[in-house]
Image: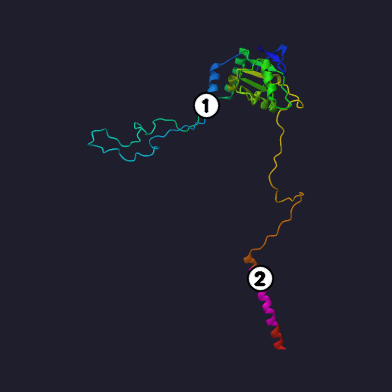
Amino acid sequence: MIEAPLFSSAGAKQKATFSLPEPYFDGTVNEPVLHQAVKTFLGNQRQGTAKTKTRSFVSGGNQKPWKQKGTGRARQGSTRAPHWRGGGIVFGPIPRSYRADIPRKVRQLARRSALNARAREGSLFVIEPVIFEAPKTARLAQLFEALGLGEKKVLVLTTALNHNVYLSARNLPGAHVMPFYEASAYDILWAQAIVVERNALTGEPVDAAMSLEAAPVVPIKRAGKSRATSRKGAANPVRAKKPSPKKAAAKAAPSAKAKSAKPASKKKKKESK
């Protein structure tokens, strides 16, 4: 059974030690797997945008520098050949993807090996859940000073997403905060000291009333108002579409003919009488 020192949330050392759980701390450190996990992680961070121009991409060199024979010099076809100054590059880097993946169980083994390596070195500290009512960098710096980690790179592993602790460590150059379940083998090996909350190892839930897991969600207000609702929220009546000028003229033309036809009919009736 591997044990680690236990501290309070203020940095005071407790008399009793904490027994690390066996599922995460079995004492084995597999160095080849650690190397593979770190190499894969760093390779996945590369953008792969480096590019050099071959002779087909270099401008110029469309004509022979001199004629084929009679000059006494070696024959040349283009001034953009690789052996010319300003010519193309042979076997240079081109845009590519460095993305690689490793099996899930290998990734888990590398994570356990990293945790065991830090526990074996005595660089793993277990503390009570850290509760910050508001982000405070000075308070977190005091905690690191109490643990003797003032000038080291520290990785703080919380039980869940603790927004206030994350904001408190953002101004400290050697500190990084993340949930325990998100830490990879590279993150653990990057830090010189690991500070883990006790509840993250035991699996006990943190009191929701005391822990500030995330920042308050602010509803997004859309700019402007919808056409379907008025200021009071009632539905606006559907506006009648105005007819086009051509349609209006077409409707008015038959009505004018009808008006002009009515007097003619009256004259015919008078003549018949």
Give the quarter of the figure containing the C terminus.
bottom right
Inspect the magenta stretch and tell me whether residue 264 lies in it: yes
Q: Nearer the viewer, residue 182 or 89?
A: 89
Q: Position of residue 5 (x, y in %)?
A: 68, 13
Say if residue 21 shows up in the picture.
no
**Residue 84 quadrant:** top left
Q: Amino acid at mark 2?
A: Ala
Q: Quadrant of residue 15?
A: top right
Quarter in which the N terminus is drawn? top right
Percent across and percent down for residue 52 are 43, 33
Q: Residue at x 70, y 88 (%)?
A: 271
Find residue 6 and report its horizontal and vertical position in percent.
70, 14
Q: Which mark, residue 43?
A: 1
- The single residue placed furthest to the left in the displayed view is 70
Which region is colored magenta?
249-265
Q: Is residue 156 something that shows in the picture? A: yes
Report the residue at 69% width, 79% height from top: 262
In contact (CB < 8 Å): disc 1 and disc 2: no
Task: Check disc 1 and give the amino acid type.
Answer: Gly
- Magenta highlight on residue 268: no
Say if 132 sits above or below 258 in the image. above
| Residue 166 picture quarter | top right
Counting residues from the start of the chain, the first of labels 1 and 2 encountered is 1
Please tell me the numbered disc located at residue 252: 2
Q: Residue at x 54, y 25 (%)?
A: 42
In the image, 195 versus 140, the foreground residue is: 140
Mark 1 secondary-structure assignment: helix
| Vertical arrangement, residue 83 with respect to residue 195, above or below | below
Neighbor class of circle 1 (other Cα within 10 Å; few <14, some 14-19, many 20+) is some
Say the numbered circle drawn on residue 59.
none
